[in-house]
Image (spheres, rainbow, N blue to C red):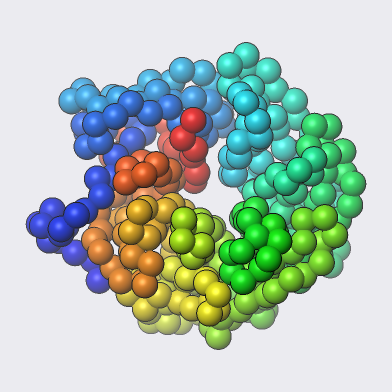
Amino acid sequence: MVLSRRQFLLQGGAVALSLALPLPSRAAVNGKHASLLAAWQLPTAVYQVGVLSWKNTRLSTPYTIDSAVDLPTRPHGLMHLQGDEYLVVARRPGDWIMRLNIQTGDTARTWQDEDRHLNGHSAVHGDCLFTTETDVLTGQGVLGVRHRETFELLDVWPTQGRDPHEMLVLPGGVLGIDEPFLLVANGGIQTHADMGRTQLNHLPMDSSVVAMHPRTGRVLNQWTLRDSRLSLRHMAVHASGVVGIAMQAHHAVEADQEAAPVLALLDEQGLSPVGESIGVNGYAGDIATTPEGFVISCTKNDSAARFDLHGRLLNTQQAKAACALASRGGEVWLGHQAGEDKNSFALDNHWLLI
């Protein structure tokens, strides 16, 4: 399934992946300036979030750090709130969310209640901020409904699954639903409050994608896959209304893990796995849209792969520990590890174009 570099370069109409890498790096291949909100870990083990300024250059450093703020623990999801304000959410099991003004550097942090932990992602609709969470006692997935400005907790809604991860706010008319709605990916992985991120893989998984009313939490629709060991995690919606979902497999047998697809497509006809996304060690780190369809980062296979809206593989590109993705039009920025330099800092899972 993985094309050679020569085959990749010969693939017609291939999108150029801009390799914005941890220091040091080779020259990037994209020709335009970009500012990205990103998170990383310093060689001193300190976690930070800030703005990277990236330019096409032949120097070993394609970007510089414009600003940086220390974080209490490892972050995960990044989201635009309004204007210069962004939200940073702790990695699961997380206990903080932080508002960051990228111009002034001002921050406001809220600590999570002990009876639930944060799962790393958020979304906004109207006056509400939604955070994906897990109830510590029951292990069930919930959405924390908060005031968008104050972060005050207003309500808690069940997500009809376990381990809710990323969510999207989609307009009416998408996926056959007439009104705007929240789309939540239930990762399905069971954990225990006393065991941190340890996965209880011997227990059944409860993975699904659920559409919820953004005012009441009412379930509008829910989709599942036949293979219950596929964790539905990160999502991106194409302009056509098709939703791409990056998956992570949790099979006990190595052969099943290798044969597991890591991309699924959701449209009005339902949710289906993409057969051409197998053979990458069962792990997709992030997903972004392209004019033709989607690009996913295959972290454990050290590659990124581009697919059209029908699930056909268009091309792949090698990139060590590929993960963070951002896109704009036909351009894609891919973050990955560059060498073993102990003086470099390591980019985290996600980033955003500013």
Q: Residue at x 10, y 57 (%)?
A: 10
Taking 179 as reference, is 279 left or right?
left
Taking 170 as reference, is 253 left or right?
left
Residue 76, compared with residue 273, is above or below; it is: above
Residue 119 pos. (x, y %): 68, 52
Residue placed farthest to the top in the image? 104
Residue 71, compared with residue 8, is above or below; it is: above
| Quarter of the image where the N terminus is located | bottom left
- Front residue of this view, candidates 81 and 135: 81
Q: Residue at x 87, y 44 (%)?
A: 153
Taking 164 as reference, is 272 left or right?
left
Q: Residue at x 42, y 31 (%)?
A: 345
Residue 123 pos. (x, y %): 68, 47
Q: Is residue 172 visible?
A: yes
Q: Residue at x 59, y 64 (%)?
A: 174
Residue 106, compared with residue 129, is above or below; it is: above
